[in-house]
Image (cartoon, rainbow, N blue to C red):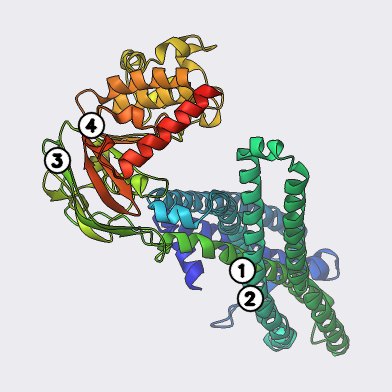
């Protein structure tokens, strides 16, 4: 019930439409009741011309027991001589009212349901996209996509189409219940004694359906995960000839999903035969009772027919309600993962009253910084690290793989927060700043450049929508990207493919540099920006980086020591700590780690030249 209420809470802003739809569905239920009531006059009056003058009794007022005649519903009809006209008019009026009300109510409920679920999907997306790096390390892309799309799709079905059906069938049951109770309340209560034998097993089946639905959604997420990985890594799959292996993985997961879905179908279908069996027993009992009552002239054939038809009409929506209950259970099962994401606390949060970082003029200081990855508490760590990067300096960070270089620079824009100590900009802890303003001050060009499946122009202007084309072109020219972009089939309007697949590695890097140039952040982080490039591309990218670095505070991570010789300061990291700090000239003959790395690269370069 808690999960259901959380789902319905998203419909609060649409309460007026929902209230109107409830009223219209109540009219639909009343129309169904009137349809059953009209059966009696048809059998006892229209099809029995022997009765002419008697007024047509529809039902008795349940409070004062006053009789309500057809003439009360159709004004001006005072006796039975025009009974067929009255009944025909009543049938047309009832069905017309039911049709119009059902159409409007169905539209309104679906509008509320679809709008509420759209709000839910937007809320979940907003929550997920604001999560820190730790969250994305713990949740695969495929599973997140499955929850945001497939799980919420299950919820949408429940709170739109099925909610409309729930209201419709509920009011139909209430309308028909009113009819049978007014005809013969004792007989009605006897007829309804079988309902507990149906509802109790249905409730138990519903709990099983919820668990089955959660497993089904998990298998669907696993299938989505395999699909996403295989399509994204299609080159690796082909290179290793593992198409058959990936097909096998996909088929096995699809088979598990099929078994879970069939289990759901079996569980859901159990309610229908239960209702059919108990309904048949009820009808047999009623027919036995009716024979004696009709012989004793205490019940007419028309009244009994009207009662039985109302009862049969009521069993159908009851059967539908059990199916609706099962679908809601399925939606609640699917919603568990969605609400788990909504409840997940954001690791990187702003302090109340966070201040905006307007400018950077002083220095970035790492003060006794310690850090451990939250998901690997016994793994890598930074330990008591102290470092100052002054405004306008170019500081290079080098060291063996796994030394903590990328981890260190990721603390500046708060992709992670320090475990202890502080990272300060102009003397203030970065945790005191508004996140958006802090990250506006930092530009990043990484070795794994991510480009969107969009135009070259939009990729350069990412984060700055509406940027004039002249500024985009200026940034591209400074990044030495204008020449190759202009040669693309549609120039700057060319779609460059997912992750920039239509471009070479050097071209992708120059687009990323142009993006950083347009952002114009005073602090620049270059994380192995040229490590994957050939010599010619590296030279072009280095020239572009030179334009980008001008007038900025730069932290460079590089394996190739030749690219950081002119850095103002070189910081050598190993095993999460700073081992050396100095210029290239100071460190290259210092007998430490930097000299060893330099000599190794010199030997490797000489070996490559010999080849």
- Residue 506 in sight here: yes
Q: Mark 4 = which residue?
A: 585
Callout 4: 10 Å neighbours few (<14), some, many (20+)? few
**Label 4, label 2: how many angstroms apart (C-alpha)?**
72 Å
Please tell me whether mark 1 or mark 3 is closer to you in this view: 3
Q: Earlier in the sequence, mark 4 or mark 1?
A: 1
Please tell me whether mark 4 or mark 3 is closer to you in this view: 4
Tell me which corner region of the image, top left, top right, bottom left or bottom right, holds residue 541: top left
Residues 600 and 234: in front is: 600
**Label 1, label 3: how many angstroms apart (C-alpha)?**
57 Å
Q: Which mark is residue 207?
A: 2
Residues 493 and 357: in front is: 357
Query: Left or right: where does residue 164 sit relative to residue 6?
Result: right
Q: Earlier in the sequence, mark 4 or mark 3?
A: 3
**Label 4, label 1: how many angstroms apart (C-alpha)?**
70 Å
Q: Is residue 434 above or below residue 516?
A: below
Residues 177 and 443: in front is: 443
Q: Mark 3 = which residue?
A: 363
Q: Residue at x 53, y 49 (%)?
A: 141
Please tell me whether mark 4 or mark 2 is closer to you in this view: 4
Q: Residue at x 52, y 29 (%)?
A: 453
Callout 1: 10 Å neighbours few (<14), some, many (20+)? many
Q: Position of residue 516 (x, y in %)?
A: 32, 28
- Contact flag, marks 2 and 1 (Cβ < 8 Å): yes
């Amino acid at each position: 019930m808690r999960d259901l209420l959380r789902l319905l809470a998203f419909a609060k802003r649409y309460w007026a439409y929902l209230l109107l739809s409830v009223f219209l569905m109540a009219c639909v239920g009343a129309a169904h009741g009137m349809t059953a009531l009209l059966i009696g006059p048809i059998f006892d009056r229209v099809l029995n011309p022997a009765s002419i003058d008697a007024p047509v009794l529809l039902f008795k007022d349940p409070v004062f027991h006053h009789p309500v005649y057809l003439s009360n519903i159709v004004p001006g009809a005072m006796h039975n001589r025009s009974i067929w006209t009255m009944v025909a008019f009543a049938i047309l009026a009832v069905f017309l009212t039911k049709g119009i009300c059902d159409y409007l109510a169905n539209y309104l409920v679906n509008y509320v349901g679809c709008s509420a679920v759209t709000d839910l999907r937007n809320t979940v997306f907003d929550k997920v996209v604001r999560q820190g790096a730790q969250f994305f390390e713990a949740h695969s892309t495929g599973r997140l996509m499955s929850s945001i799309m497939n799980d919420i799709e299950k919820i949408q079905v429940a709170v739109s189409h099925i909610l409309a059906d729930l209201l419709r069938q509920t009011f139909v049951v209430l309308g028909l219940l009113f009819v049978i109770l007014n005809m013969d309340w004792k007989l009605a209560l006897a007829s309804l004694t079988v309902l507990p034998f149906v509802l109790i097993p249905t409730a138990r089946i519903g709990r099983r359906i919820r668990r089955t639905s959660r497993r089904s959604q998990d298998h669907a997420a696993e299938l989505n995960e395999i699909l996403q990985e295989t399509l994204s890594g299609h080159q690796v799959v082909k290179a290793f000839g593992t198409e058959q292996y990936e097909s096998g993985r996909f088929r096995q997961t699809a088979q598990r999903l099929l078994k879970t879905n069939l289990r759901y179908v079996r569980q859901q279908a159990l309610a229908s035969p239960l209702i059919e069996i108990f309904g048949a027993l009820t009808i047999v009992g009623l027919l036995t009772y009716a024979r004696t009552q009709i012989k004793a002239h205490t019940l007419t054939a028309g009244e009994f027919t009207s009662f039985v038809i109302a009862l049969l009409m009521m069993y159908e929506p009851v059967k539908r309600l059990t199916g609706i209950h099962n679908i809601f259970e399925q939606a609640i099962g699917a919603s568990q993962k969605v609400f788990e994401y909504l409840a997940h606390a954001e690791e990187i949060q702003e302090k109340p009253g966070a201040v905006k970082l307007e400018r950077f003029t002083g220095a970035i200081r790492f003060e006794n910084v310690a850090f451990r990855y939250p998901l690997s508490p016994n793994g890598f760590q930074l330990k008591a690290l102290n470092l100052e990067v002054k405004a306008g300096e170019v500081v290079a960070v080098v060291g063996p793989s796994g030394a903590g270089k990328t981890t260190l620079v990721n603390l500046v824009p708060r992709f992670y927060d320090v475990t202890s100590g502080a990272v300060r900009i102009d003397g203030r802890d970065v945790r005191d700043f508004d996140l958006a303003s802090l990250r506006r001050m930092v530009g990043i060009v990484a070795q794994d450049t991510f480009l969107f499946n969009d135009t070259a122009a939009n990729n350069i202007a990412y984060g700055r929508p509406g940027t004039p084309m002249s500024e985009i072109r200026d940034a591209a020219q400074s990044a030495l990207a204008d020449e190759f972009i202009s040669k693309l089939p549609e120039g700057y309007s060319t779609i460059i493919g997912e992750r920039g697949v239509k471009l070479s590695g050097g071209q992708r890097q120059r687009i990323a540099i142009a993006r950083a140039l347009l952002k114009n952040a005073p602090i620049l982080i270059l994380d192995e920006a040229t490590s994957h490039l050939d010599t010619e591309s590296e030279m072009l990218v280095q020239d572009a980086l030179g334009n980008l670095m001008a007038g900025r505070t730069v932290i460079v991570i590089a394996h190739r020591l030749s690219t950081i010789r002119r850095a103002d300061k070189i910081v050598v990291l190993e095993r999460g700590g700073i081992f050396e700090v100095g210029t290239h000239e100071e460190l290259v003959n210092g007998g430490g780690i930097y000299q060893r790395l330099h000599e190794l690269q010199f030997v490797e370069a000489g070996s490559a030249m010999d080849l």
